[in-house]
Each structure stands twice: as structure tokens, then as C-alpha cells.
Image: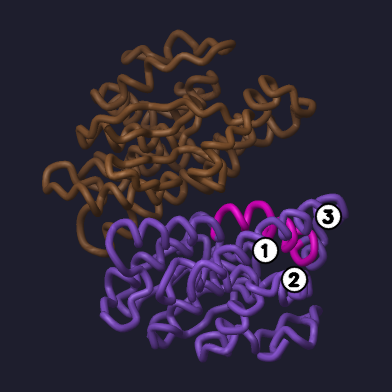
Chain colours: A purple, B brown
């Protein structure tokens, strides 16, 4: 069976868990702790980060966007395509995936996870409240953008669910686990996220448990 | 004619300039200065960064990897395909593009450009010699990896030139402009880069001029 190397609070790994679940592709999850240097994992992916997918044929595919493209290329179906439409529609889906995987991650997700989780559990360095403040302030700008995108159509990239929704929801879900999303201030984003959360593909994420961290009660609540 | 919004020292924009040139696609370059907040540019790309391609039909495509995928989808030719092969080969090309566009950029390119160029010209913040030292030390690790990749085959992703070579060369070329690459310590990488540099597509990059910065003499020398 295909194996997905992941970490519960890696947003990119959550993105791929959602992609696999939406497409009904079963996988064996293998946990990689980011602050433990695992040599056998590094030999799979010299970049050292999750997600890494190992296919049934032993092919190793690394990083969120690359795995998503790989799955779209090798598992074509007309009903569950997540990168659909003409070149223009596909460019818009990819733009939004890139937005969350890189811009959101750099400005919000990575600094928060680094300060709140990695430093705490690995004991490396002092937690910086100014880094946390800046990231939370950046989060408001991104939430406004999600509000705006949600108002434009049913889904973030248009008329149908796409990789863009899965990437965005994956990244937000990590911050929701940490209790950092102020949903009251962002009603349109909330309506869209509630729709994402109630999809069967999301169940696995809502059941995630991380030793030493307790998500807020509404994290797994579909009526939050 | 298609327009490419770029900045001379944006590695992602250089990547797309190489892709367009390799494919013989003519474009009008439009310079965007990163520290000048240009509202009309922000309305094209709310992420605010280059490259942004505007096609002849007025379609706006943003960010290096997204533009590269768009060009591969809309300009298919058998001879100059830069994302070639089966799903496995394509995943390897995409992995390496991702490596340079994100990992190399985060660990080496972005901090060096931020300290050496943006802070200097925009007058924002003090230049941190410790950030520069860390980035230069990371650069050695990446150069070792390019040495290793270059030894494995003619090109970084295998038997043929691909997006991986163009992304890697684009990112290295910016550091070469700043005089940061110690080629003597990396003979295999140097041989590969010399081959890239002598391609007609590279000429445009070698002629780049940035007010206030003088690249080392060997930057534009094909026998460096």
C-alpha cells in the first residue's frame, strides 16, 4: 500500500491527506517528528520535510505541490479531478495552492508552528512573542483574502472544489488546532470552512492528536 | 505581445525569462522594483511579487512554478519540452524546481538579497552580518548537492535539459551576480553552470544591469 510520511501539524502533509481522501486513495500514514533527525527518512527526501509519498511501486514523491501534481497526473478521473478546467482555470487553482503553500506558510503558518510547537517540544531557542504577534497580524490579512475569495463563488477557485480549497483548508486547520483563528471576524471564510470541515475527507484531520497539545473544543465541532 | 513583470535580481523571474527564451517565446519585460509599492502591479498580483506573466489575451499568471506549468501546458512542442517524460521523471523535475524555488530561496537566496540589496536600497532596517553568514554557510550545502546532481547525468534531472536546470541556474545566477559563489570549491557544479551560461537563453541574464551594483567581472564571462 502507498505510504504517506507526515506530521500531524504539517499543513502541507494535511493538504495531501485531504487530496488522497477526496480521491478515495487509501494510504498508510507514517509519522515523522520534525525535530528528530531520522536518517532513513532523509535518504528518502534530502530536503528533510514532510509530506513524502511512497507509491506501491516504490516511487518516492516529495513536497505538497509536487505530490498533488503527481496524483492529478496518475489518477485521472473526470468526477474527482481537483485540478480542472482550461489552462486559465488551472493557473488560478495553482496560484491559490502556491499562495497557501508558500505565502501563507511563510507569513503565518511556519513562524507560528516554529514558535509554538517546534521550539517548545525540541527545546531549541527562546519563544519570540514578537514573531507570534507579527504572524497573527498577517493572519488577519490572509483571512480577509479568504473572506473575499469565498464571496466570489462556491469554492475558492470557482465553481467546483479544487486543490485550492484543500490547500487553504489544510493550512487553516493547523491554526485552528492551535486556537488562532478568530472565526467571528470572518463570517464568509467561516461558512466556506464549515463546508470543508463537514466533508468526509476532513474527518481524519479532525481526529488528530498531538501529545502535549490540546486543541480548542470547537476544533472538531462541525457547528463551531 | 506577452509582458513579463520582473526584477533583475528576482531568481524566480530569471527562471521564467530562461523558460521563455528556451522556448523562443518573445516577451516585453516590465521592471517592478520590489520596495516600491506599485498599486497597479498589486491589482495584477495581490501577492505583490514577480514574476507575473500577462499573455496576449490579457490572462494574468503569477509566480514562477505556476507560470512554468502554464507555459508547458499551453505551448506543447516535442523538441523543447522542459517538463518531459513519464510521471516519475516529471515528479523528479518538479521536485528539483521546488527545491530551488523554495528551499534554496528560503535558506540562501532570499536572506542574501534581503540583506545585501533590499535593505540597502530601500533603507529599511540594519544589515545583519549573522543572517549573511548563515545564508553563505547554507549555500555550501546546496552547492555540494548541485555537485552531486551534476555528477549523476548530463543535466540535473537526467538525460535532457529541463525546468530543473533553468530553476537552479536562475537562482545561482543571482548569487553569482553578487559574487557569492566560490566556483573553485565546486568543479562539477561549475562545469554544469558553464554549460548553462553558454546557452543563448542565458545571454539576456548576463547583460542585466542594476543601478548601484557591479557584478564581478567573471559574471558575464563564459570562461570563468
The percent position of residue A175, horizontal first and vertical second, equals 71, 70
The residue sitting at 47% across, 85% down in the picture is A28
The residue that label 1 is drawn on is A143
Q: How many marks?
A: 3
The disc placed on residue A133 is: 3
Query: Could you tell me which chain the residue with mark 2 belongs to?
Result: A
Circle 2: element type = loop
The percent position of residue A87, horizontal first and vertical second, equals 29, 57
In-image side of B163 versus B140 (left or right): left
| Quarter the N terminus of chain B occupies | top left
Q: Which residues are magenta?
A: A101-118
Query: Could you tell me which chain the residue with mark 1 belongs to?
Result: A
- Frontmost of labels 1 and 3 is 1
Mark 2 vs mark 1: tell me if same chain: yes
Q: Are marks 2 and 1 in contact (CB under 8 Å)?
A: yes
The residue that label 2 is drawn on is A181
Amino acid at each position: 500500500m502507498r505510504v504517506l510520511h507526515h506530521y500531524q501539524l504539517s499543513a502541507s502533509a494535511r493538504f495531501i491527506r485531504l487530496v488522497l481522501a477526496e480521491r478515495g486513495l487509501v494510504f498508510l500514514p507514517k509519522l515523522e517528528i520534525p525535530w528528530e533527525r531520522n536518517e532513513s527518512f532523509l535518504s528518502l527526501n534530502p530536503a528533510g520535510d514532510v509530506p513524502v509519498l511512497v507509491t506501491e511501486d516504490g516511487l518516492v514523491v516529495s513536497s505538497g505541490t509536487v505530490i498533488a501534481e503527481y496524483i492529478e497526473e496518475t489518477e485521472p478521473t473526470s468526477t474527482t479531478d481537483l485540478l480542472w478546467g482550461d489552462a486559465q482555470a488551472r493557473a488560478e487553482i495553482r496560484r491559490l495552492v502556491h499562495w497557501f503553500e508558500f505565502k501563507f506558510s511563510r507569513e503565518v503558518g511556519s513562524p507560528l508552528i516554529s514558535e509554538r510547537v517546534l521550539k517548545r517540544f525540541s527545546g531549541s531557542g527562546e519563544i519570540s512573542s514578537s514573531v507570534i504577534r507579527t504572524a497573527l497580524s498577517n493572519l488577519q490579512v490572509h483571512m480577509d483574502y479568504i473572506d473575499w475569495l469565498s464571496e466570489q463563488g462556491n469554492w475558492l477557485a470557482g465553481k467546483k472544489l479544487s486543490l485550492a480549497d484543500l490547500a487553504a483548508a489544510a493550512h487553516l486547520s493547523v491554526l485552528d488546532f492551535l486556537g488562532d483563528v478568530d472565526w467571528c471576524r470572518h463570517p464568509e471564510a467561516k461558512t466556506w470552512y464549515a463546508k470543508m470541515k463537514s466533508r468526509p475527507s476532513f474527518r481524519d484531520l479532525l481526529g488528530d492528536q498531538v501529545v502535549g497539545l490540546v486543541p480548542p473544543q470547537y476544533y472538531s465541532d462541525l457547528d463551531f
